[in-house]
């Protein structure tokens, strides 16, 4: 993070806080610090700030609580230790979930009286605990959250109202610092708008698109939406640094030997094209021999890769920390994994209307043509794998992740019964959503089966019916006119 020009901001902030008629749920004044209590106050203030919709809460040392006069403090968090540890380090071990809080130390007035402001970020997904206990502010008092069930209920309701994209990635930066952090020329290029001639025009456009929030003192907040899409480096934003897309290339079909591993450090919008280009360069190609020439054909269709990578980015659960979208390339398959479980069942990916937990992110990615305008794009993925004569893609979940798997080419004779059945089911789903019939002829075309071997297609259809994935549209239809629909149709 760039260093903020703090002095003027801190003095102005202190003046504003001291004008308050009394302590509030989001501001606490103290003379000196009881280190064991600091964490309790951080918990209470983080929870109260979330409940009240405040951008930050503040714990201020060096103030007389009765008349709000600056009296100075002996608290020096930058040099003091507690239980042989740095104070912030000790607090971070005790606070769950990890939230951002910062100690600002400065002096006030002619007497240079020391003051400490602890700036506390509101929690966003769950109540903050200190040493296993959740606290809340009731008026100017610190209480245990469990002793106030109505406030606890309201706090949980609050978490559902603030989407990830509107939460803050960085706070109170100057306009210069903001424009150093965000790749604003890419924003105007991708949205097809001319670059404004002055800084104010740039900031106004980014604010109108919810990439920034303007605050007092000519300062700006960068929202998660702005950072995750247009960060020059995601590592500049502490809680987003682990959300960079990882690419891992393995030597064979196991994870035993890694050939290469990289992270795409740019924001998703600005880095997407480079990410796809890099993937295509890594992927093996098959040689296709035509009547007059040879040409290299990529192992997987680029359109399918684009859609699956975009889906992994858009539909991830940002509340799951320490993990990010990941693309793993093996000798004969490719796995694309994102944090979070899907909002629809995996066997209904192709037909269900898309549901995203990150609507603003999804909307912007559609707007700049990175993902599908309508639908989930899975119909294109299935269509492309059929066109390339690949096994059907597999969609699966683990405890906290969703994974899409693309497979290299296999002839019909090389597929096992499960692979043939799964491909038949997705083929049926695709035909249904494009309002065409699945029958023996379409299945033969899907698997590149010659007409004289139509019995092979019939056996695949029969087994897919037997396991309950598809059903005849009309059981009374004759053999030649028989067609099939998915079980859910």
Image (cartoon, helix red, strand yellow):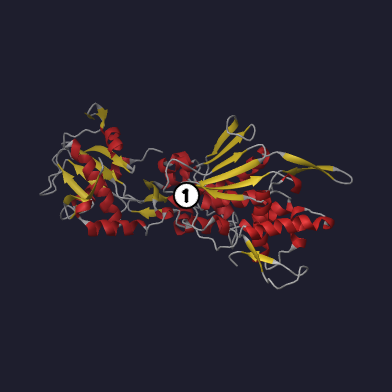
Query: In the rendering, at what x and y percent does residue 169 appear?
Result: 40, 47
Q: Is residue 113 visible?
A: no
The local crowd at label 1, few if under 14, some if 14 to 19, many if 20 or more residues have their Cα within 10 Å, is many
287 and 243: which is toward the camera: 287
The quadrant where residue 321 appears: top left
Quadrant where the C terminus sits is bottom right
Left or right of 469, for residue 77: left
Mark 1: which secondary structure?
A: loop
Q: Residue furthest top?
A: 84
Left or right of 257, for residue 424: right
Does 480 appear above or below 54?
below
Left or right of 397, for residue 38: left
Does 291 appear above or below 463?
above
Q: Which residue is mark 1?
A: 340
The quadrant where residue 40 appears: top left
348 and 274: which is toward the camera: 348
Query: In the rendering, at what x and y percent does residue 457 appear?
Result: 75, 57
């Amino acid at each position: 993070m760039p260093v903020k020009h703090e002095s003027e901001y801190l003095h102005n902030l202190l003046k504003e806080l001291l004008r308050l008629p009394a302590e509030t749920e989001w501001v606490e004044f103290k003379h000196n610090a009881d280190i064991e209590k600091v964490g309790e106050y951080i918990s209470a203030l983080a929870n109260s700030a979330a409940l009240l919709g405040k951008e930050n809460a503040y714990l201020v040392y060096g103030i007389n609580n009765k008349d709000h006069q600056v009296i100075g403090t002996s608290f020096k968090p930058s040099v003091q230790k507690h239980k042989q540890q740095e104070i912030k380090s000790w607090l971070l071990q005790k606070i769950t979930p990890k939230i951002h809080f910062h100690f600002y130390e400065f002096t006030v007035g002619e007497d240079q009286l020391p003051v400490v402001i602890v700036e506390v970020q509101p929690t966003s997904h769950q109540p903050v605990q200190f040493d296993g206990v959740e606290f809340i502010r009731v008026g100017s008092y610190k209480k245990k959250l469990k002793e106030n069930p109505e406030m606890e209920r309201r706090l949980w309701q609050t978490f559902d109202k603030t989407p990830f994209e509107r939460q803050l990635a960085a706070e109170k930066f100057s306009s210069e610092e903001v424009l150093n952090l965000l790749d604003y020329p890419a924003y105007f290029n991708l949205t097809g708008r001319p670059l404004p001639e002055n800084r104010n025009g740039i900031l106004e456009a980014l604010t109108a698109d919810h990439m920034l929030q303007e605050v007092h003192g000519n300062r700006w907040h960068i929202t998660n939406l702005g950072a995750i899409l247009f960060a020059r480096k995601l590592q500049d934003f502490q809680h987003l640094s682990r959300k960079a897309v990882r690419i891992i290339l393995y030597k064979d079909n196991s994870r035993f030997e890694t050939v290469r591993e990289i992270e795409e450090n740019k924001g998703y919008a600005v880095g997407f094209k480079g990410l796809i280009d890099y993937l295509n360069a890594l992927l093996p190609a098959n040689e296709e021999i035509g009547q007059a020439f040879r040409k290299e054909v990529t192992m997987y269709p680029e359109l399918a890769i684009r859609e699956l990578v975009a889906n992994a980015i858009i539909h991830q659960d940002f509340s799951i920390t320490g993990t990010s979208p990941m693309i793993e390339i093996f000798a004969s398959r490719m796995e694309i994994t994102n944090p979070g479980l899907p909002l629809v069942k995996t066997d209904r990916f192709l037909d269900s209307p898309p549901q995203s937990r990150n609507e603003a992110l999804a909307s912007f990615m559609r707007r700049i043509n990175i993902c599908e305008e309508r639908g989930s794009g899975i119909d294109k993925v299935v269509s492309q794998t059929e066109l390339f004569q690949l096994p059907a893609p597999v969609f699966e979940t683990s405890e906290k992740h969703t994974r899409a798997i693309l497979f290299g080419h296999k002839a019909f004779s090389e597929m096992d019964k499960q692979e043939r059945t799964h491909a038949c089911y997705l083929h049926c789903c695709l035909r249904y959503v494009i309002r065409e019939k699945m029958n023996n002829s379409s299945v033969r075309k899907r698997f590149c089966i010659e007409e004289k071997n139509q019995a092979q297609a019939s056996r695949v259809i029969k087994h897919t019916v037997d396991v309950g994935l598809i059903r005849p549209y009309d059981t009374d239809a004759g053999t030649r006119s028989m067609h099939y629909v998915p079980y859910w149709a």
